[in-house]
Image: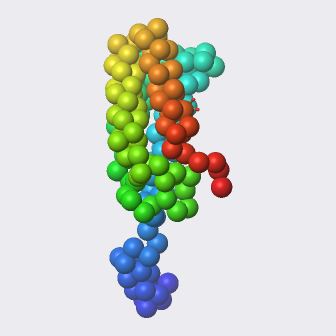
């Protein structure tokens, strides 16, 4: 690459010209946490063997990732996403959904650390229910 072209690319990157929007960032973060959650789901549904240490690591990863997307819902970032305006007009309700989700992820992590499959089943279902509840209220149709 020509030095001048390299300089141009460096400057554009530094200006954030190629940076993700908040909506793009949070979608990526949701997809990241979904990877752990779906792997755990195959175990909970009996489609994959239960390896307690692997499962506990996935739960810990889910817990570490779970809060990240919620830092990327600044007001005015509705465009190019399925986010409904209610996220900002009913922000107390949205924050409540978020808190419930994070609490339930913590409970799932505790069950995974305890290697207690009965508790894992219940707490996994509770997390899934929380995803659905928030989507029903705050996520619009696919565009
Ligand atoms: C998932 C997923 C969701 C939730 C929800 C649970 O795996 O992608 O949005 O679980 O479907 O009801």
Q: Residue at x 55, y 61 (%)?
A: 80
- Quadrant assignment for ligand 1: top right
**140 in relation to 1, above or below:** above
Residue ranking furthest to the front: 89
Q: Residue at x 39, y 25 (%)?
A: 104
The picture places residue 15, in percent across and down from the top left corner, at 37, 78
Residue ranking furthest to the bottom: 4
**108 in relation to 116, above or below:** below
| Quadrant that contains the C terminus | bottom right
Q: Residue at x 40, y 86 (%)?
A: 7
Q: Residue at x 59, y 24 (%)?
A: 42
The picture places residue 27, in percent across and down from the top left corner, at 50, 51
Q: Quarter-wise, where is residue 62 in the image?
A: top left
Whether residue 53 is visible here, answered yes or no, is no
Q: Closer to the camera, 136 or 43?
A: 136
The picture places residue 103, in percent across and down from the top left corner, at 34, 27
The picture places residue 98, in percent across and down from the top left corner, at 38, 37
């Amino acid at each position: 690459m020509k030095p001048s072209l390299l300089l141009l690319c460096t400057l554009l990157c530094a200006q954030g010209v190629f940076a993700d929007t908040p909506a793009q960032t949070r979608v990526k973060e949701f997809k990241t946490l979904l990877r752990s959650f779906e792997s755990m789901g195959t175990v909970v549904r009996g489609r994959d063997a239960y390896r307690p240490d692997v499962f506990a690591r996935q739960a810990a990863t889910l817990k570490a990732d779970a809060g990240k997307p919620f830092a990327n819902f600044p007001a005015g970032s509705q465009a190019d996403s399925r986010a409904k305006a209610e996220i900002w007009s009913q922000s107390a309700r949205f924050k409540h959904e978020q808190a419930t989700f994070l609490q339930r992820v913590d409970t799932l992590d505790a069950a995974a650390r305890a290697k207690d499959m009965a508790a894992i089943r219940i707490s996994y279902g509770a997390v899934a229910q929380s995803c659905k509840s928030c989507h029903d209220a705050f996520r619009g149709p696919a565009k």
